[in-house]
Image (cartoon, rainbow, N blue to C red):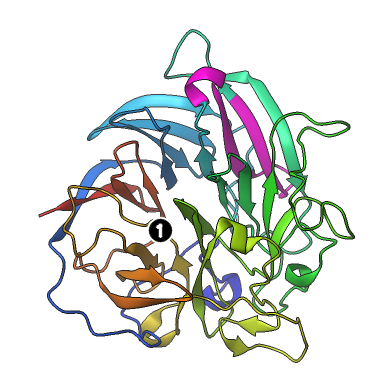
Amino acid sequence: MSRRMSKPRSVVFAATALCILVAAAPSAAQPKVKLNGLASFDKPTFVAAPDDAGDLAFVTEREGRIKLLEGERKRGTFLNMKRWVGCCHVETGLFSVAFPEDYERTRRFYVYFTNRQDNIEIDEFKRSRNHDRKADRSSRRKLIEITQTGPVNHNGGTVAIGPDGYLYAATGDGGRFDEPSDNGQDTGSLLGKLLRIDPRKGKGRPYRIPPSNPYADRAGQNEIYARGLRNPFRMSFDGKRILIADVGQNRREEVNVETVNGTRGANFGWNIFEGTRRFRPGSIGHHDKPAHQYSHGGGACSITGGNVIRDERMPKSVRGTYVYADYCSGFVRHFQPTKGGSRGDGSLGIGEVNGIVGFGTDARDRVYVVQLSGQVSRLDPR
């Protein structure tokens, strides 16, 4: 399948070049940042860690394993869930893992993947009671399964714990390049949405609906927190803010930045808008416009969202900025999120990096860079 047909960055894949940014301010001296290669994995997709994990980080591998990385050394397998993961055709596999604040006490954590039926699934597991570096496979509890309506791409891919303690997940719209889906605007579908649930067992289902969800007391799927997303493969939290990088169709890649409360009931526009450009006729009422966007010039095609840098070791010029990449062009850039927009977009100064599919942070706020080809690296000062 061609690059444009598969629209690679839902978790899959392409080449290199440099991109023309929309309204990108010229950068001054490049930041004193380096990319420190740590270890190689089998098709890694994401990095995360519990709050008290020290130097320990958890690396998801596309085929269904979660591996341990401590410093620059691999420390074995935390969980092997290959029997449940559908991989690796088109844009399928294990995409992310999330640890709540009470992980040390409850031992619970959450994974986002495509299952053997090519549907989106979010499961809960527990760490072993007797071994703090092993998961208990028998503890698996399915939370959500979302039936795909399209050709198993546009799966989204990130599960994360918000500052309110709820579980958030960003789902793809189930469409494809030549047939854009209407799911993003359909409040009867969980596809193309930001979902928010309380993962504790509820009545009649394996989780609860937060009463403040916008469709909790009216027509629409109760789990929906915001809509109008195309393929939000990567999202992250920074304090009370949420940053959602949404893969575009053929003109715009975008980053949406809102407070968590401000995201309630938001409509990010797809498939009436692609970024700030109208994609097709129609009306959606209020459009929550992206804080940052860029075009497909210079070989760019697919955004991989990252994190706001809070690592105190890093230069002041990059602290508080949001780092992101393009899968196809290989650029790695950063900007300062501002109220309703962004400023100072520029290169991070580490050169082009092929095939970035994820970022992540550890308990010390250090930022990791994940390449599907195998390399997991860390952003360090130089």
User: Who is closer to the viewer here, 264 or 92?
Assistant: 264
In the structure shown, which secondary structural element does the residue marked by tag 1 occupy?
Answer: loop
Residue range of the region highlighted in magenta in the rendering: 103-125
**Horizontal side, residue 36 vs residue 286: left or right:** left
- Amino acid at the residue labelled 1: Gly
What's the residue at 71%, 50% (across, down)? Answer: 118
- The reply, left or right, for residue 309 in relation to residue 62 is left
Relative to the observer, which residue lies in front, 180 or 15?
A: 180
Q: Specify whether residue 185 is in view.
A: yes
- Residue 114 location in percent, x, y? 65, 47
Image-quadrant location for residue 116? top right
Relative to 285, residue 234 above or below: above
10 over 141 or under it: above or below: below
- The image shows residue 64, relative to residue 293, as above or below, that is above
Indicate whether residue 106 is drawn in magenta: yes
Q: Quadrant of the C terminus?
A: bottom left
Instruction: Work out whether residue 90 can be spotted.
Output: no
Place residue 170 in its image quadrant.
bottom right
Tell me the residue that label 1 is attached to. 306
Q: Residue at x 33, y 84 (%)?
A: 24
User: Residue 347's x, y, as percent?
Assistant: 25, 73
Residue under the image location 44 percent in, 46 percent down: 46
- Dot 1 surroundings within 10 Å: few (below 14), some, or many (20 or more)? many
